[in-house]
Image: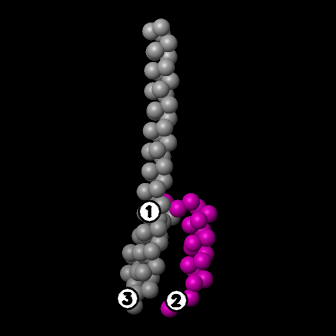
Amino acid sequence: MKSDYNIYLRRDGTLTDRFSKMVEEYLNDFEEEITVVTLLNYYSVCSKLDIQDDDLLWAIDRVLQQFMPSTDYTAWSVARAYTPKE
């Protein structure tokens, strides 16, 4: 009987570990998504200012390149290049 208890205990521990890892990955993805959305909005605001800080825009661009999937970053870069300045 004691061996059955140990088997169940190990299975429960394995399930708990897997669930914890899944939640941690979800939270990391969520934090990255918040970072990307915030930086996209900040880039948009900064690029519309009368006096643009090119260094700041470049830095935001580099961070977005690291956090965004490459296909999303490429699409955003192309759309940004063809967006008329106001």
Residue 24 placement: quadrant: top left
Whether residue 58 is visible here, answered yes or no, is no
Q: Secondary structure at mark 1?
A: helix
Three-letter amino acid code of the residue under disc 3: Ile
Residue closer to the observer: 10 or 47: 10
Where is residue 6? Give x, y as percent. Answer: 46, 15
Q: Which residue is mark 3?
A: 51
| Residue reaching furthest to the top | 1
Cβ atoms at labels 3 and 1 below 8 Å apart: no
Region in magenta: 66-86
**Residue 55 percent coordinates (x, y):** 39, 76
How is this picture coloured?
A: one colour
Q: Quadrant of the rendered structure where residue 75 is?
A: bottom right
Q: According to the image, label 1 marks what residue?
A: 34
Give yes or no for residue 75 being in the magenta stretch. yes
Residue drawn 46% across the image and 15% down it: 5
Precedes in sequence: disc 1 or disc 2: 1
Q: Residues within 10 Å of mark 3 (few under 14, many from 20)?
A: few
**In the rendered image, which quarter is residue 39 located in?**
bottom left
Which circle's residue, 3 or 2, is located before the other in the chain?
3
Answer whether labels 3 and 2 touch (C-beta < 8 Å).
no
Q: Position of residue 52 (x, y in %)?
A: 40, 84
Q: Amino acid at mark 1?
A: Ile
Q: Which residue is mark 2?
A: 85
